[in-house]
């Protein structure tokens, strides 16, 4: 559980869940491009069908939506809650793009795969600008040829100086892992909103699994295997995941009200009641629970508690606005 003391939930905030992006999904990219500017945007997990942030091949495969989210963050506050299909995302947007073909390189980034990914690598600093020559040497040779040595593009990478003190451009995307969820955030009316991807309190085994795949040793292993196999392991695993049916809740169960009531009760017992008992909230406060994961698109109100299980943007290319509750 994480309190977001520095963030207020806006009345017109946008929620997007479970879009399960796969490479080539142009419709979803267009959907992201049409999100209204200056709105608070919550990405509620499983936005990507498979994105493991520690695996370079995974990042390359999902680059177009990574870039779209980076672009969105220039005009919108973006808060990303990791799901079970997209995790270890903390460093991804350090290497995403502000402009087409232009990417930020973090000083600790590995260079083994970026020479095939980047057109230019820009460190944004008023004091020093440098380019990692070894990363883009091959690209510039192939793309521009030796005749372009004196061009501006070529001149840009002449400096090989690497200064660890250089300030790197950061993109204000707030990312919260499974371990940090749910998020507790105040609304503009001083009520409480409880946010999670939705895969909390599923089972003891699932809880162990989610902690296990976020273990630094496991994530390092993912990265190591991705490098030594040149992405083959990720591609085979992604291929298996891609062939699984992405189902709406209604495809495999119909007990909507019973399910909604159980989920609301779980949040009440584990979050709302402790907040009241510890003096953080009062019985009279309103509580809004918003989660994804179940591809449901249903809501339930009980007294001063409002529960909403978001629909999947994979099936419905639309977003949920908080003012639909308020």
Image (spheres, grey):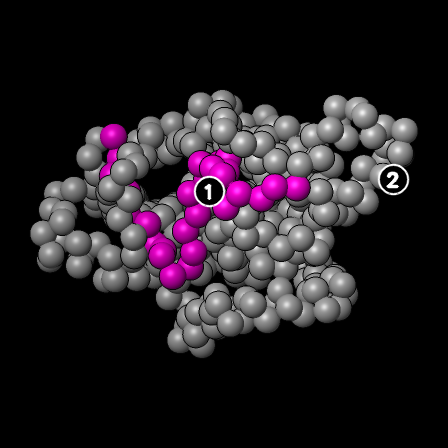
Looking at the picture, how far across and down is residue 301, in whole percent? 30, 45
Q: Residue at x 78, y 43 (%)?
A: 137
Relative horizontal placement of residue 162, taking residue 236 as reference (left or right): left
- Decide if residue 250 is in sight here: no
Indicate whether residue 217 is drawn in magenta.
no
- Decide if residue 11 is in sight here: yes
Q: Give above or below for 76 relative to 61.
A: above
Q: Quadrant of the C terminus?
A: top left
Q: Residue at x 76, y 63 (%)?
A: 230
Looking at the picture, how far across and down is residue 164, in whole percent? 50, 46
Q: Nearer the viewer, residue 244 or 110?
A: 110
Residue carrying label 2? 142
Q: What range of the chain is rendered magenta? A: 160-188
Q: Residue at x 47, y 69 (%)?
A: 215
Looking at the picture, how far across and down is residue 251, in whole percent? 59, 57
Indicate whether residue 187 is drawn in magenta.
yes
Kindly give the residue lying farthest to the bottom in the view shown: 205
Q: Nearer the viewer, residue 297 or 1?
A: 1
Alpha carbons under labels 1 and 2: distance apart: 31 Å
Residue carrying label 1? 165
Crowdedness near tag 1: few (<14), some (14–19) or many (≥20) residues, C-alpha within 10 Å: few
Picture disc at residue 103: none
Q: In which quarter of the view is residue 220 placed? A: bottom right
Judging from the image, what secondary structure is the residue with disc 1 in?
A: loop
Q: Give above or below for 214 relative to 29.
A: below
Relative horizontal placement of residue 21, taking residue 318 as reference (left or right): right
Q: Quadrant of the N terminus?
A: bottom left
Label 1 close to label 2 by CB (< 8 Å): no
Relative horizontal placement of residue 99, taking residue 153 as reference (left or right): left
Judging from the image, what secondary structure is the residue with disc 2 in?
A: helix
Looking at the picture, how far across and down is residue 79, in whole percent? 43, 41
């Amino acid at each position: 559980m994480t309190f977001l003391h520095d963030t207020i939930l806006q009345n017109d905030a946008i929620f997007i869940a479970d879009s399960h992006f796969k490479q080539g999904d142009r419709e979803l990219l267009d959907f992201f491009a049409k999100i209204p500017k200056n709105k608070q945007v919550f990405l509620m997990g499983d936005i990507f069908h498979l994105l493991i942030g520690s695996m370079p091949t995974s990042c390359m495969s999902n680059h177009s939506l990574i870039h779209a989210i980076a672009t969105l963050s220039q005009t919108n506050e973006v808060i990303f809650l990791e799901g079970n299909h997209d995790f270890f995302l903390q460093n991804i947007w350090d290497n995403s793009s502000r402009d087409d073909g232009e990417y930020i390189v973090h000083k600790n980034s590995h260079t083994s795969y970026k020479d095939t990914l980047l057109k230019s690598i820009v460190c944004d600093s008023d004091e020093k600008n440098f380019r990692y020559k070894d990363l883009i040497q091959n690209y510039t040779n192939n793309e521009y040829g030796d005749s372009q040595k004196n061009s501006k593009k070529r001149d840009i990478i002449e400096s090989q100086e690497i200064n660890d003190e250089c300030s790197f451009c950061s993109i204000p995307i707030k990312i919260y892992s499974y371990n940090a969820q749910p998020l507790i955030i105040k609304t503009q009316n001083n009520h409480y909103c409880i946010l999670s991807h939705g895969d909390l309190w599923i089972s003891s085994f699932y809880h162990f699994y989610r902690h296990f795949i976020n273990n630094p040793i496991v994530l390092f292993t993912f990265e190591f295997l991705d490098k030594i196999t040149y992405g083959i392991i990720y591609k085979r695993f992604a291929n298996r995941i891609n062939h699984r049916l992405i189902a709406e809740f209604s495809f495999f169960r119909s007990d909507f009200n019973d399910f909604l009531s159980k989920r609301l009760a779980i949040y009440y017992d584990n979050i709302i009641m402790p907040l009241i008992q510890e003096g953080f909230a009062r019985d009279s406060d309103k509580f809004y629970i918003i989660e994804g994961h179940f591809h449901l698109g249903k809501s339930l109100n009980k007294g001063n508690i409002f529960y909403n299980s978001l629909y999947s943007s994979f099936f419905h290319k639309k977003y949920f606005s908080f003012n639909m509750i308020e």
